[in-house]
Structure formats: C-alpha cells, structure tokens
C-alpha cells in the first residue's frame, strides 16, 4: 500500500491483532498482588483477532459479517480506538463513533446535557449543537423529556435518543453495530429512512449486521471474519456466500 | 509520549469549549443536586475550621496569629488536592461513557474534573479573602500575591498527577482506595496544615520536602498572610517533585489506562 492510497483512507490498519488475557483467579486488590508477587497467575489467552491489514476508504460503507464470537465487535473497537491494539498500528482521520445499544451517555445527566456532551466529544462547537438541538429532540420524539435525567427513560426512549444523536451529530467515521434493532416498528421505519437519506451517502460507515439484506442494500464492500481471521474482503456477494456456507457447515 | 499528548490536545478546535462544558456539568452534578446546593461547598471548610480551632488554638494554644485565616487558606488548598485525588479514584469507571464509544483523549476527562474543582476552590478562596480582609485587623494583600498563580499551577500538577496514578492503579487493584485513605491521613497530620512551621521543622526536619503538599501550603501562606516572597528552594522543589509524579501518572495512563475500556 503506497502513501497516495493511504491519503484516501479514513482508516488504515496494519498488522493489527488482539489477545485477551483471562485470569482464572482474579487478582484485584493490592493485598492479593503483594501476596502473589512471585506467583504469576494462570492466564488463558484468547486470540480474538489474528494479525490483519485493513483499509477503509473515505465515504464508503463497509459491511462486517461473521458468526457470533468471530471478533467483529473487537475489530470495531480496535478501529474506533476504544481498545488498544497489541501489534501493528491504526491511523484514523477524524473522530470515530461506535454505536450499538447506546452511544455513550451518562445516566446521571439529562437528555439535554447528554446531547451537548456527545456533540462536543464528536468535535462540534456549542453553537453547532444549539442549531441541531431541536432536530435531535424532535427526531427522538422526546420533547417533554428534555430536562429529565435519562436514568428515568424507558429502554425505547434511550435507544431513540442515542439513534437521534448519532444521526444528527455525525462523527467522521461511524461504526454501527446492529442498529436497526432499535425501537418499535414505526421508529425502525423512520430510522431506515433517515439512514438511507442522509447517512449513507458520502459518509464513512462500518456496518455490522446479521441481516444480509441490510448488508446487500448498503455496502459496497464486505469483510467476512471467521474465528478472528479476516477471511475475505471485497465483493459483497462473495463475502455473504462464504458466510452463509459457514453457517450451513455448522448446521 | 508527553509531546504526543500535548500535540493531540491542541490540535482539536473545540477542546476548550468541551473542557468548560464538562467541568461545568461536573460541578453542577456535585453541588446543585443536593437541597443545600452550593452551601455544602462552604459548610465543609467552615466545620473543619471550627474543629481544628477548638483543638489547636483553644486547647493546645499554639498562638499562631490569625489562626482561622491560617487554617482556612491551608484547608482550601488541601481540600482541592483531596477532592482531585481521592475523589477521582474511580473516574475511569464513572466516566466510561465518554471514552467507551469514541476516540476521545482520556486526559481531557481528568482535566475537566480538575477544572470543576478549580471552580469550587475559586468560590472558597473568595470567601477566604472576604473573611481575611474584613475580620482580621490590619491585614492587607500585597503584590506578592502574584506568586499565587504559579503555586496554584503547582497544586494542579500535583493533583492531576495523583489523580492519574490512583485511578489507573484502580484498574488493577480495587482496594487502592483504602490504601490511599491511610496515605492521605498521614499526609494531613504530618504537614504544616495545623502546626506552627517552626515547631514542625524542629521536630521533624525535612518533612516539608517529603510531603509534596507542604511547599504549596507554606508558600501560599507566606505570600498571602505574611506578605513576603516564597521560600525559593521549596518553591522550585515543589515543581520538580510534582512534575516527577505527573510523569509517573502519564506513564500509567498510557500503560494501564489505555486498556480501561476492556478492563472495567
């Protein structure tokens, strides 16, 4: 990969991998650590991601598929720089935002405060958030609950708020982890509509889904992951076929 | 390593705004949630002053001039240190929502909490000045007060350093809280906070160099209560000492804190 190509990348990852060390007997206190100074605990090593290279181009929608436990979520967390990588490096141009059930909101704060914090964390100025504020609240259908702490929200209300923040306050690179499972049917329709209208175009999106129709509809390229290995990246048809084949083998 | 963090810090355009927003919300969470609100921020130092006044002035008769002001000033600085260190041990857990979904720099979280504590200290300092100038006869503030700025800077570095050290150790040893409570207790009693400096120095020589809060308290009292220059060797030693701890803190943040999202 030459320098010219990397310029067009939103994310460049080289030789990245991740191993989780799971300790059988946890050493969580100063006392335990002192008593076991010369007695290293047994750690189970779980190779969540084997070394891989990955380029995500600016403006593309990349699909990420694989069975449960294949390492999709770990990969996304590495790429979003939430987890550090064990080997190699990741270059990200701009802000990243990871979205699954939530988008990083504090339950001790009100909807208003969470909107301002999320917006600010993603690089917006206060004035820019002011301008977006009403649209966010309206889309989330939470007009009467602007100054209510979100710990009193129902799970549906929380999900709507999170989705609305994510739609309106975009990061440069969005990682969407099964987001179409949010809210009731009516809200889902609304979510898909806004997603198609303003989100997918010219925005860098990494989409994780078990729904192959969603992947087919929106992704120009698809990465297929199996047991922490990047098996294939490219044509969506081929990737989906490989994934379905694996599912059949297991069945 | 440090250069990278500072570089990253200044690159963003809305970082100052974000710092202020996070500090404000943190401050609000702490004081506006109770019925007594901001009053609590004052009740604490006033009740402490009352207790120590009875013990050290009425009973032990140390005969320190303007003892209440002497205590008030020391306690404001001390409480800032304790709130910024003990109060932030679990910061990586309570503020996880800020870094769990984005690539936000964790250092910003620490600085915003320090910022919120600075607002609190600012209010207390105004109360102190009002008391000092109105209720003590013949007291005044001289130009020496400009040295208060570097002294506060030293205090911020020291507090940030311990905030980083403790909260990152918390990731691997949850009972650091109890251990630190003992250290803080020691640091409080073996310091010039309550005692006449001459007596402390005579009985425990060198303690003002070992306890990093000492240089800050001693020099703040010199410039404000005594209208004299700081003790320069203590003044510079304070910066070297707290800078050393900050270096350890940043090292731990890079070493342990980077894995906070997966460990907590």
Image (tube, coloured by chain):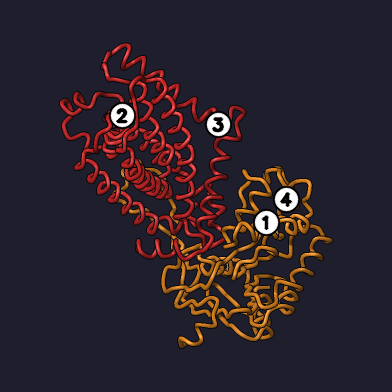
Chain colours: A orange, B red
* Circle 1 or circle 4, nearest the eye: 1
Q: Residues within 10 Å of mark 3 (few under 14, many from 20)?
A: some
Q: What chain letter is assigned to the residue under label 2?
A: B
User: What residue is shown with label 2?
Assistant: B225
Tell me the SS state at disc 4: helix
Label 1: few (<14), some (14–19) or many (≥20) C-alpha neighbours in 10 Å: some
Subunit ID for the residue under disc 3: B
Residue on which disc 1 sits: A130
Q: Residues within 10 Å of mark 2 (few under 14, many from 20)?
A: many
Residue at x 46% of width, y 40% of height = B117
In 3D space, how far apart are the residues under numbered discs 1 and 4 (Cα atoms)? 26 Å
Mark pair 1, 2: CA separation? 46 Å
Q: Nearer the viewer, residue A221 or A66?
A: A221
Q: Gap between marks 3 and 4, in whole Å?
A: 33 Å
Q: Residue at x 42, y 22 (%)?
A: B134
* Vertical placement of residue B43 versus B216, above or below: above
Q: In which image quadrant can residue A56 be found?
A: bottom right
């Amino acid at each position: 990969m030459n320098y010219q190509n990397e310029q067009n990348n939103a994310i460049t990852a080289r030789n990245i991998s991740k191993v989780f060390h799971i300790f059988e007997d946890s050493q969580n206190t100063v006392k335990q650590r002192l008593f076991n100074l010369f007695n290293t605990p047994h750690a189970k090593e779980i190779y969540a991601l084997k070394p891989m290279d990955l380029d995500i181009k600016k403006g593309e929608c990349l699909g990420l598929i694989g069975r449960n436990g294949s390492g999709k979520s770990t990969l996304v967390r590495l790429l979003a720089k939430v987890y550090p990588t064990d080997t190699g490096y990741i270059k990200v141009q701009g802000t990243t935002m990871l979205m699954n059930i939530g988008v990083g909101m504090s339950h001790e704060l009100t909807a208003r405060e969470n909107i301002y914090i999320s917006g600010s964390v993603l690089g917006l100025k206060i004035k820019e958030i002011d301008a977006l504020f009403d649209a966010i609240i309206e889309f989330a259908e939470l007009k009467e609950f602007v100054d209510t702490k979100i710990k009193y929200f129902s799970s549906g209300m929380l999900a709507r708020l999170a989705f609305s923040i994510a739609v309106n306050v975009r990061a440069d690179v969005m990682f969407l982890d099964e987001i179409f499972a949010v809210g009731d049917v009516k809200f889902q329709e609304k979510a898909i509509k806004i997603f198609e209208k303003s989100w997918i175009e010219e925005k860098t999106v990494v989409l994780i889904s078990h729904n192959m129709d969603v992947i087919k509809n929106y992704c120009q390229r698809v990465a297929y992951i199996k047991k922490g290995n990047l098996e294939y990246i490219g044509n969506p048809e081929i990737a989906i076929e490989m994934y379905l084949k694996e599912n059949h083998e297991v069945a | 390593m440090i250069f990278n963090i500072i570089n990253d810090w200044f690159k963003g355009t809305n970082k100052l705004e974000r710092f202020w927003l996070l500090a404000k919300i943190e401050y609000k969470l702490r004081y506006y949630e109770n019925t007594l609100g901001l009053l609590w921020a004052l009740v604490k130092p006033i009740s402490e002053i009352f207790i120590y006044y009875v013990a050290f002035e009425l009973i032990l008769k140390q005969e320190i001039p303007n003892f209440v002001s002497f205590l008030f000033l020391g306690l404001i600085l001390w409480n800032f240190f304790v709130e910024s260190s003990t109060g932030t041990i679990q910061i990586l857990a309570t503020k996880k929502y800020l870094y769990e979904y984005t690539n936000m720099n964790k250092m910003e979280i620490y600085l915003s909490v320090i910022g919120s504590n600075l607002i609190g200290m600012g209010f207390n300092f105004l109360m102190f000045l009002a008391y000092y100038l109105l209720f003590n006869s013949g007291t005044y503030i001289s130009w020496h007060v400009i040295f208060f700025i570097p002294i506060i800077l030293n205090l911020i570095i020291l507090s940030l350093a311990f905030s980083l050290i403790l909260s990152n150790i918390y990731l691997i040893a949850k009972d650091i809280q109890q251990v630190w409570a003992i250290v803080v207790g020691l640091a409080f009693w073996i310091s010039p906070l309550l005692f006449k400096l001459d007596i402390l120095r005579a009985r425990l020589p060198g303690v003002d160099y070992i306890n990093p809060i000492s240089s800050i308290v001693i020099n703040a009292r010199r410039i404000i209560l005594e209208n004299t220059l700081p003790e320069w060797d203590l003044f510079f030693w304070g910066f070297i000492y707290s800078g050393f701890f900050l270096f350890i803190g940043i090292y731990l943040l890079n070493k342990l804190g980077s894995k906070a999202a997966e460990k907590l």
